[in-house]
Image (cartoon, helix red, strand yellow):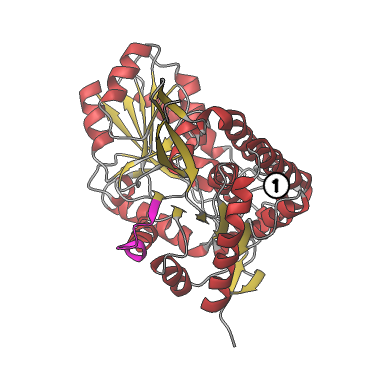
Amino acid sequence: MGQTLKCISPIDGSVYAERAVLSLQAAQDVTARARTAQKGWAARPLQERIDLVMAGVAAVGAMNDEIVPELAHMMGRPVRYGGEFGGFNERASHMAEIAETALADIKVSEDERFKRYIKRVPHGVVFVVAPWNYPYMTAINTVAPALIAGNTVVLKHATQTLLVGERMAQAFHAAGVPEDVFQNVFLSHDVTNDLIAGNAFDFVNFTGSVGGGQAMERAAAGTFTGVGTELGGKDPGYVMEDADLDAAVDTLIDGAMFNAGQCCCGIERIYVHESLYDEFVAKAVEIVKGYTLGNPMDEATTMGPMANVRFAAEVRAQITEAVAEGAKAHIDIMAEDDGGAYLTPQILTDVTHKMRVMRDESFGPVVGIMKVASDEEAIALMNDSEFGLTASLWTCDLDRAARVGDQIETGTVFMNRADYLDPSLCWTGCKNTGRGGGLSVIGYQNLTRPKSYHLKKVAG
């Protein structure tokens, strides 16, 4: 009997979906069909590829009434938030809008003797390994521009959101994207490794854990296959003495707690100037005490369970260790906290960087808040991390934010906002958050390769 992947619903621990994985031979057949289909797809006019991709995006939107409760069952996000189509559509639309310019030839020179230019040409077959926390939005970051650029795509989704890839493939195929151009697969780790090591793909984009990213790079070693990664995070917020306090509290706490804290660029640690610290903490605690933890299918629920019991166990362990080491927990255990996937959101003070909760990725509804006296102290603390995805700065002084931002080891600097992915900007990280960049013009550069033309004219 073959191996199966099971999505265990965090709502009640039941098996919500189950799919058989492909054998190595069947998976190789998938990638072979993708490779065969790629040249014909790339030969289509750019506008035709754009139109087909955007029709696929619209077809996903037409499924939203089914997708929203499906996501609640698979990973616990409350139905009241309405799914991901807004961001999904925004990202794909932007990449469609900039495609002609981003993929245009780079003209170097032309005279009576030579014509010289650089083209952007597709890699070939792009493998997208997408995570469960925002399964549609994270996938479309690469799927849309890869297809538009003329690549074929093989999508492998996380087991926790097993049905997302099927939904996307169904929608795109119904919109006219050929089946071999965009394929969804269910794979074991071993088969995934063998495909990458066997040069089945021309580019791999992985979003997930640091360990997962390392496994992708090890599999690709020696193949010269490009690997783009977005891995762990421990994103900081810094509230300066001139900040709009109410806006800072509302945005940073929402950034820490939304989606049960399971956001790639969620806020996991906050540094507040000593003049605002006490008021910030009081307001933050009041907000979190107002959350309703419960079944995500209930419209009254503002925080659902974490996606998996083991994810919640790690957050509980970090909180318990921190309290044992001197941290103060401000939120009493909620009645709905079952010791499993349903977890009380928590605010911690009296924390230090010796505590795991301020060093390790939590990826759950907990945030530590520390008092600082200066920009220099805040910068040192923000940089005291193995990760670097985003940082959120709160001040009325744009020049100050830019100066501080220049000194932070991060992929994105926000001023007076947080936890947002702007498709016009490159989505990238540094340190153990990974390498590469998605979206924006740079996203197209990473999903294509340069090809130079040096054409000598024959004298007439």
Reading the image, the residue beneath label 1 is 79
Residue 220, magenta (yes or no): yes
Dividing the picture into quadrants, the one containing residue 32 is bottom right
Disc 1 packing (10 Å; few <14; some 14–19; many ≥20): many
Q: Is residue 130 left or right of residue 92?
A: left
Q: Quadrant for the N terminus, please.
A: bottom right
**For the residue labelled by badge 1, is the local secondary structure a helix, a strand or a loop?**
helix
Say whether residue 351 is magenta. no
- Identified at 54% across, 39% down, the residue is 289
Residue kind at label 1, given as amino acid type: Val
Q: Nearer the viewer, residue 98 or 12?
A: 98
Q: Could you say which is closer to the camera, residue 132 or residue 452? A: 452
Task: Name the image quarter holding residue 74.
Answer: bottom right
**From this viewpoint, which residue is outermost toward the bottom?**
1
* Residue range corresponding to the magenta coloring: 218-227
Q: How many marks?
A: 1
Instruction: Let me know if residue 420 appears in the view.
Output: no
**Residue 173 seen anywhere in this rendered image of the structure:** yes
What residue is shown at x 55% (from left), y 61% (from top)? 35
Residue 70 image point, x, y percent: 70, 56
Q: Is residue 19 above or below residue 347?
A: below
